[in-house]
Amino acid sequence: MAEAAQGPEGFLPLTPAVFHILLALADGEKHGYAIMQEVEDVTEGQVQMGPGTLYGSIKRMLAAGLIEESDDRPDPTLDDERRRYYRQTGLGRTVLRRETERMAELMALARRKHVWAGIGSRSIPT
Amino acid sequence: MSEASGRIAEHPDVSEASGRMTGGARRGRSGAPATIDLSVRIYTWFLAAYPARFRTEYGLHMAQAFRDLCRRDFQRGGFAGMLTLWARTSLDLARTTVEEHIERGLDMNREKFVRWSGWALMAGAVLFAAGLIIGSFDSYDMDPIGGVDAFYEIGQVAGLLLGHLLFVIGLLGLRTGYAGRSGSLGAGLLLLAVFGGVVSLGGLVGMSSVEAGWLAWMGGYLAVTLALAVFGIVAVRRRVFSRWNFAPILAGVGIPFLFGIGMVGVDSVSGQAPEWGAFLAVVLTSVGLILIGYRMQAEAGKIGEVAA
């Protein structure tokens, strides 16, 4: 059902929700709650998505062809078969990579401008 | 509570709010803490606030995710944890219900506009071709409207004007519906086609009073058809339409070809150029536009999904 609406550049910049969902799916397919948990864990609780935000974003990402539903189950005996699993598409992977590159360029610019000293530092004291 | 919300609430995923909890809270019939059962039920009632299509597609999964969150937060923080979850979830519900309704409304408007503009493009193509062809029977081409050939003249003016107006609406709908999936080149070409259509319509309206009107009409029309022809190549490569991606080429190639060989415009249709060449160009253009219009109204429902 997914249909690519535009080229990868047309999706940038990504909203925080879409970026985190794509990032959560970078290492394999997950169901909705697992995505929410992963986002919360990797951001140390700074990003907490509610079900409305999650499934609203999932709906748009499916329509844009960034993710797709998966029929595979990691282990059917361990999980509820009624859950829907999602995975990145090729376009989703490309968009995530481009967004990450875009952010890296911004961070490099911030370093050159002495706004930010790098990983582990919050900002350069003025 | 709506029927759909009721079904979600009755679903085993939702109503069995986990028997795996080990806390000391009072348990419901399913073995889950009553607080979780109640929370999930209330949440499913709130789901009725979402648009029906969204709720039908995702309501069950949202309730399931909320149940999982309840279990986790109850385990972590008891009632205080549940209160914090509800505070967060209320904000999420309030924000996303509004978002989904706005998006649904926009999609519906877009969908309707693209569908109707598809019909406009088809009707415009027929009227425009009819105007040109009727005008070709006008044997006194440059005389004022009236007299023995009044039928041909009025038919030509009415067909061209109304056809052109519908044609511009159709092009606007084409850009609205398909720019997003046509890439930057395709979107630019569709914008050029709309702009050319407006210039051409202006020229047609002002033709009788402004000398440059004729030039604007033909220049605008040439821009429209050229833009459509090149857009057709983009459409074939990117599969912009689900079928008949060659249609814009068909719509755009005839008139520039006539211009290219020096058999230009209305005069060519009315007799100075080979009749068959001009007739073929008009028929090709019209058939192409009708095919595009047909695809637009047939695919309008999918446009909302893609645009999302």
Image (cartoon, rainbow, N blue to C red):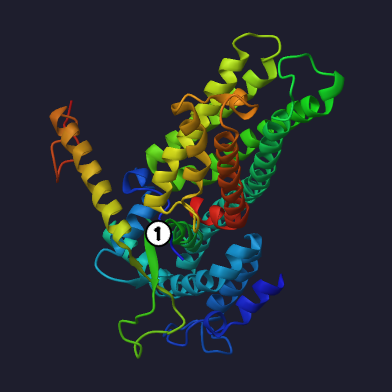
Q: Residues within 10 Å of mark 1 (few under 14, many from 20)?
A: many
> If the image is split into quadrants, where does the N terminus of chain B sit?
bottom right
Report x, y in % for residue B255.
52, 33
Question: Residue B59 vs residue A16: left or right?
Answer: right
Residue A45 appears in view: no
Residue B29 appears in view: yes
Residue marked by disc 1: A65
Report x, y in % for residue A114.
15, 29
Q: Tag 1's secondary structure?
A: loop
Determine the image quadrant of residue A113. top left
Report x, y in % for residue A34.
36, 71
Question: Residue B121 vs residue A97: left or right?
Answer: right
Residue drawn at x 71%, y 15% is: B142
Residue drawn at x 22%, y 37% is: A106
Q: Mark 1 — on which chain does it sit?
A: A
Report x, y in % for residue A2.
43, 63
